[in-house]
Amino acid sequence: MELELDTPHGAARAHVDPADDARAALVLGHGAGGGVAARDLVAAKQVALSEGVAVALVEQPYRVAGRRSPAPAPQLDAAWTAVVAQLLDGALRALPLIAGGRSAGARVACRTAADTGAVGVLCLAFPLHPPGRPEKTRHAELDAVAAPVLVVQGTSDPFGMPSAGPGRQVVAIRGNHSLSSDVEALSDAVRAWLQGLLP
């Protein structure tokens, strides 16, 4: 099911896959220059569906409008929050929310986790810092999330390797920022975390 959803910054698009007797909803955002067909997002979606979790893959308004350059962070966050609210009021009504995304989408999910009421946050290839700029760390965005967090990160990701922390699990898998080298390991990590999060 494909939904066009209004946001303060234009129309967003959600690709919703319901699950039979769903026990939660996983809403995932894309990376800055990519779309919802990224291999890691698709793999996470398939795992979630097999675990009885409905999934929505969300395209930010700038992508729906055909632009490749991402909008500023406040606009991304506002659009995401609006989309999640509409999904939880409609297609994913009454389901606990697991927010997440890959790269920039993971940052959005972390920054808005409290506002959306997420019970967990799934970060695929969290961009800890710009390549070669470790002093520009974004660890505070991860640290601010009160809900359980899973970070799946490539061991050779030029955007850095986040550290584990209270309520935050970090799984390092073979590969770089695309997380396409070992989809099986990614799937295993997501499955184990979902099973622990949703007993």
Image (spheres, rainbow, N blue to C red):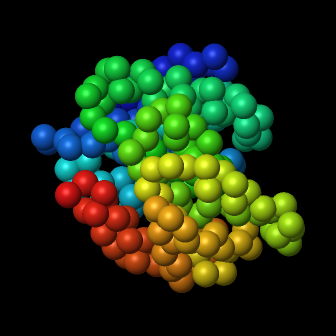
Q: Position of residue 13 (x, y in %)?
A: 49, 29
For the C terminus, give its image quadrant. bottom left
Locate residue 127: give its quadrant.
bottom right
Residue 147 position (above or below residue 196): above
Residue at the image point whose x is 13% and y is 40% from the top: 21
Q: Position of residue 93 (x, y in %)?
A: 28, 26
Residue 18 position (above or below residue 103): above
Residue 88 in view (yes/no): yes
Residue at the image point whose x is 55% and y is 71% from the top: 164
Point out the residue furthest to the front here.
166
Q: Could you tell whether 152 is left or right of 134 in the image?
A: left
For the N terminus, give its image quadrant. top left
Residue at the image point whose x is 77% and y is 35% from the top: 72
Locate residue 65: give its quadrant.
top right
Locate residue 111: give its quadrant.
top right
Q: Could you tell whether 99 is left or right of 34 in the image?
A: left
Q: Position of residue 131 (x, y in %)?
A: 81, 68
Point out the residue furthest to the left here.
21
Residue at the image point whose x is 52% and y is 57% from the top: 123
Q: How many marks?
A: 0
Q: Position of residue 197 (x, y in %)?
A: 30, 57
Q: Nearest the camera: 146 or 23?
A: 146
Residue 30 in view (yes/no): no
Residue 128 position (above or below residue 11): below
